[in-house]
Image: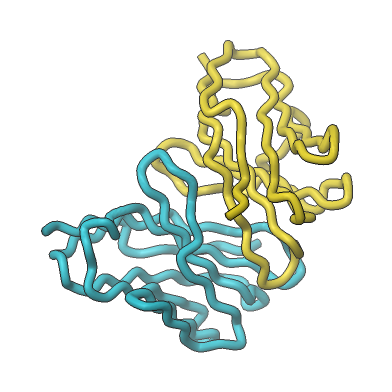
Amino acid sequence: GENVEQHPSTLSVQEGDSAVIKCTYSDSASNYFPWYKQELGKRPQLIIDIRSNVGEKKDQRIAVTLNKTAKHFSLHITETQPEDSAVYFCAAKGQAGTALIFGKGTTLSVSS
Amino acid sequence: EPEVTQTPSHQVTQMGQEVILRCVPISNHLYFYWYRQILGQKVEFLVSFYNNEISEKSEIFDDQFSVERPDGSNFTLKIRSTKLEDSAMYFCASSTLGRGADTQYFGPGTRLTVL
């Protein structure tokens, strides 16, 4: 089955810096890659996603890139703000399946 | 904006007891899911449900677990005989299409504590 690896597990940046979180997946049939942000004690919230027919997608300060050949995808956050502090999870999903397979999460801390 | 809701927010039970976790998916969604998150760990898929049938389940979803849509709005997860290791946050989610590139929306979760 699908396996998703996520790095780093923790990331500390200064306000205004960029943050990059990387994930790799094992199943070449996976074609949907969402990113969720989870604040302490709250539900995972979708922040951006990418389909396998797209190499990059951007939404304001957030961007996601996908390299299908290498089977990895990354989340880029620019001009980080303290409110970006949270746990970020990447996930992967195949065309035929319904399950989201999550990475272990990255705890991002943005200090002002 | 419509959201997935879950009740209760926190459930405490004794080992061996049965618990039922409740969810109200977004009204026009057709696929429903349960995930769990043990404290400090990743979110893990349990089961998906469509058209009153289980669509997919993980190895975690053994005979102790069952799901049901008892009426037109609720979706439940039952754990028949709880174990200490069932202590976790349980998230319900829903989506429109299920398969393919389909966004899943998560509820706020039920924290289950088994003593």
Colour-to-chain, cyan: A
Colour-to-chain, yellow: B
Q: Residue at x 55, y 62 (%)?
A: A3
Compared with B78, A93 (above or below) is below
Q: Position of residue B53 (x, y in %)?
A: 87, 46
Query: Quick check: B68 left or right of A74?
Result: right
Question: A22 and B31: which one is in front?
Answer: B31
Q: Position of residue B9 (x, y in %)?
A: 53, 28
Q: Is residue B42 visible?
A: yes
Query: Quick check: A89 left or right of A50?
Result: left
Q: Residue at x 38, y 71 (%)?
A: A22
Q: Is residue B58 visible?
A: no
Compared with B97, A77 (above or below) is below
Q: Quadrant of the N terminus of chain A?
A: bottom right
Q: Residue at x 48, y 55 (%)?
A: A45
Q: Residue at x 39, y 73 (%)?
A: A75
Query: Quick check: B83 left or right of A106?
Result: right
Quadrant hosting residue A79: bottom left
